[in-house]
Image (cartoon, grey):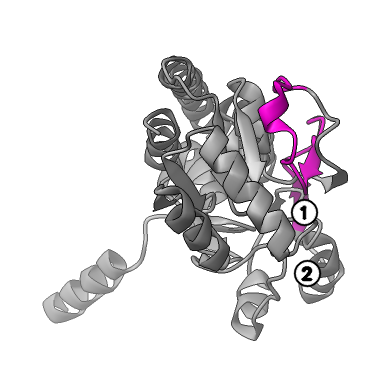
Amino acid sequence: MRKLIIFMMAVLAAVPAFAQMKVFVTIAPQKYFVEQIAGDKVQVGVMVPPGSNQHSYEPRPRQMADLAQSSIYFAVGDPAEKAWLSKLASVNKNLRIIQTDRGIKKLEMEEHHHGHEEHGHDDHDHDDHDHGMPDPHIWLDPVLVISQAKVIADALAQADPMNKNFYAANLNGFTNRLKAIDKDIARITQASKNKKFMVFHPSWGYFAARYKIQQIAVEVEGKSPKPAELARLIDTAKKQKLKVIFAQPQFSKKEVETIAKETGARVVFIDPLAENWETNIINVAKAIALQ
């Protein structure tokens, strides 16, 4: 009998005290947001793995199998998600798909944002670029993350009402931290002499709009620039005295390296999909301000 009791105690010790709710997100920064609110009460799967391009990623069979066991999918509003949502619903009819971008007014994606910078246009002059699809990169503005966090907390509380007070308390703490981050980034970027930065893919439109700086995209209408366009970019970088040209791990760095070589600038990688969102966005602000 004593051996049986010891065996049962060992079995019980190996069983988790509670079953974690399984949820899925599209990108790694969302995983960070969910974990700030839910702590260890959820297990978070990420659809787009590190180094992948969220605009063109296709879900893997293993991910679809994991989604069959998940309660919530937190969508971020990327157009690529539209192609997945019907698949997700067919895999798990009980899966709640939560649009974390609801209520957020989208900017238009800046497909072409150079050519006239040298003529003194201000940050809000739209004559020097064309508009494309809605910009999905809302997670790169701390103020907009406050809105997304509220949606996440509400969905978690509905799915797990026993812990709604826990989620509410964590949301309050995370919101206060986001407000502090917003103030820190504003201070960092306001101290920068150069209010313009050049990056291959225009991921940072919301960040730039929030902190009144200007993003100059190397990419033109989703494609690498042609030789004449590349020459204009080089001329712009020289006239703006840019010390840094930013590349992104998910895209080619060839054109960025060419511009850097011709202008004497450094190539610095910034990743809009980094999971450690808080550290990353502060570091990006500092990198932009130091150029």
| Magenta stretch, residue numbers | 96-124
Left or right of 100: which side holds 284?
A: left
The quarter holding residue 67 reads bottom right
Q: Residue 66: where, in percent of width, then height?
A: 60, 74
Q: Dot 2: what SS?
A: helix
Q: Given the image, on which type of amino acid does mark 1 rest?
A: Ile
Q: Nearer the viewer, residue 143 or 243?
A: 243
Image: 205 above or below 98: above
Could you tell me which quadrant the C terminus lies in? top left
Label drawn at residue 88:
2
Left or right of 266: which side holds 123?
A: right
Left or right of 118: which side holds 171?
A: left
Label drawn at residue 97:
1
Residue 49 showing in the rendered view? no
Q: Earlier in the sequence, mark 2 or mark 1?
A: 2
Residue at screen point 60% across, 54% down: 200
Q: Nearer the viewer, residue 35 or 95?
A: 35
Left or right of 196: which side holds 144?
A: right
Q: Nearer the viewer, residue 218 or 13?
A: 218
Structural distance between the alpha carbons of marks 2 and 1: 9 Å
Image: 268 above or below 194: below
Does the magenta segment cover residue 107? yes
Q: Dot 1: what SS?
A: strand
